[in-house]
Amino acid sequence: MNITSHPIAPEEVMAFLDGELSASRAQSVDEHVKHCADCADLAAQLAETSRQVSAWQLEKLPPALEAKVCAIAEKQFSETPGFWLSLVSYLRPQPWLRPILAFSFLGLVVLFFYPNVRHETSILQGWNARNVGKLESANRSSRPGHESSPMNSSQASKSAWILNSQSEQMAFTTATNKPEAYATEKEDSVAEPVPSPAPIRPPMIARTISLRLITRDFASSRASLEGVLARHHGYAAQLTAHTAENSQRSINASLRVPAGELAATLGELKSLGHVETESQSGEEVTQQHADLGARLKNSRETEHRLQAILLQRTGKIADVLAVEQEIARVRGEIEEMEAEQKSLEHRVDFATIELQIAEEYKAKLDDAAPSASTRVHNSLVAGYQHAADLLLGFVLFFTEEGPRFLIWLVMFTVPGFFLFRRLRRAVASQI
Amino acid sequence: MQDALPAFVLSSEARFKVMSVSPVQPQAPAGVPDPSDERLMLAFSQGSAEAFAELFSRYKQPLFGFFRRRLADAAQAEELTQETFLVLLRSAARYEPRALFRTYLYAVAFKILRVHRRKAIFRATFFGTQQPAKEPATRDAHDANLLVRQALGKVASMEREILLLREFEQLSYAEIADLLHLPVNTVRSRLFRARLSLRDILAAPAPLAAPANLTESEERA
């Protein structure tokens, strides 16, 4: 059937016979079929094919099966559902009700949790605002031997951002959970004439700042870094400088600066270049320090008692030696704990700044670049070598691994072939 | 010729009246139309045993025919018919009338058939093919049946599936497309190819093969 002479496609004739065309289209196809012998012939053939296919008759469904299904259904209908099943089916919402219920549940969740979150946030904000200056001064004064520097209000306000950082908030959240810290807040909120029952003990926080700067003038930044450290009584615990030619120069340094001057030092460091990344963290070591102090006190008392025993009591040489040995052991423990305590206090007194200063590097055009022909020649030689290496690699690989692969191939191919043949037969029998 | 055309266009409602053979089918009062399948299914999902009985009486034979025409073993066809109705019983509470009930039912049946075929292929691959039980009394009773079976066995599998769904399950093109996850135009073109192919096979003067010489796919009854 030629499509150009037939405005109706053969498939449309079939769809017309199947009643799958719209009314208007079916009418036009009907008109066409009435006047076109080819299409009428096709329609007749399709109808005849359908008639032949419909001659395939089947046996009736066995009554036994019918009875079996009816019995199962009857059993299911006669069973009374359990309490929970009944409740679930009773409460099962209509489809239009589901989004409303979902939003209502979400709203309840928000209403339940939001006031708690808001309350905690307000406590944190109020605590930070009130104690920012007080904390800094108390921190400085509580450290014996610390080189204190006066902290004016501008410095206090500069350090406010430290306290507002996330890590600091975490530290202060811990602090607010402690009875003495919470007492501080309470104390501020009540009237002034009430005397404070206990002195304020601010938390001991070991601070670590990580800073990455990009600078245009690398040499002056490096020189300024030493000036900043000298002005703020800090020092470089570790410093590595990379100053290779024709590459980006950089400095990686671990700086220690007094905690009281951390804000001012950071401010000056940031002026050395463009801040690329900055992160801050604070570790509260108050509890650790207190535990260490208690243990140290006990050990010292033990040492004193042992010394008293050694002085006042007389006995065998073995007993004297045993007491001296015990004194030596306790002394060792005391020294270890003292060192640990000093290290802890040092970490609190001196904040750590992990500083990385990188140069804003611009590649320079090399005046002595090889000519184009030389570069093409070199590329060709390098390409040939790479191709030869690759080919050689293939040869070596197959020489080395080929026999093994061959054995595996034989082992899997034979059963795989039989399995595939059976699978193909099985698929053909099931289609 | 025009007189013959309307007879070719089958309506599903008419089919149900012809194919429903259940003696327990409830008689609707005169003048009251039969409730639709979807209404019955909704009533069934709310616990109406009568609705299930009516649905069962309407679809037991078409569903059995669906499996019987696709499987070589009559016992397996019965088993899968029963399984489909059991699935219907179990999942009635979750039914939502998003499509025609018969599309839903044949989708369930099609899924069960696929699972059965997959298991059968696995069993046949690893444990050998199991011959279906012979039914000499009914298998070759009519030459026409054998001829159609042979001819359908030669049609490509997907085209044959579309042809069977159209000719025997009387699904519309859209329903077949939905069931087989194909575009409607693809269904139409493949159905056309299948019919032409079947016409050519049936028109060819091929001698009737002896039952013993049939392949397994041709032995499908």
Image (cartoon, rainbow, N blue to C red):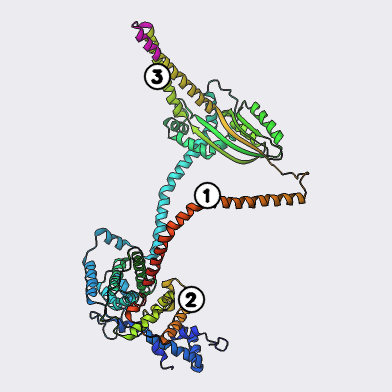
- Residue A423 visible (yes or no): yes
The CA span between labels 2 and 3 is 89 Å
| Residue occupied by mark 1 | A400
User: At numbered mark 2, what does the secondary structure look like: helix, strand or loop?
Assistant: helix
- Foreground of the two, A353 or A169: A353
Residue A308, position in %: x, y? 38, 9
Q: Nearer the viewer, mark 1 or mark 2?
A: 1
For the C terminus of chain A, give its image quadrant: bottom left
Kindly identify the amino acid type of the residue bearing the numbered disc 1.
Glu
What's the amino acid at mark 2?
Thr
Please report the bounds of the magenta region as a residue range: A311-325
Q: Chain of mark 3?
A: A
- Same subunit, labels 1 and 2: the answer reads no
Q: Numbered disc 2: what chain?
A: B
Q: Eyeballing the image, is A63 above or below A279?
A: below
Q: Residues within 10 Å of mark 1 (few under 14, many from 20)?
A: few
Residue B186's tag is: 2
Taking the magenta stretch, the answer to whether it contains residue A230 is no
Label 3 near label 1: C-beta < 8 Å? no
The chain carrying label 1 is: A
Count neighbours of disc 2 (C-alpha within 10 A) and say few if under 14, some if 14 to 19, many if 20 or more: few
Residue at screen point 35% across, 78% down:
B214
Q: Which residue is mark 3?
A: A298
Please determine if labels 1 and 3 lie on a single subunit: yes
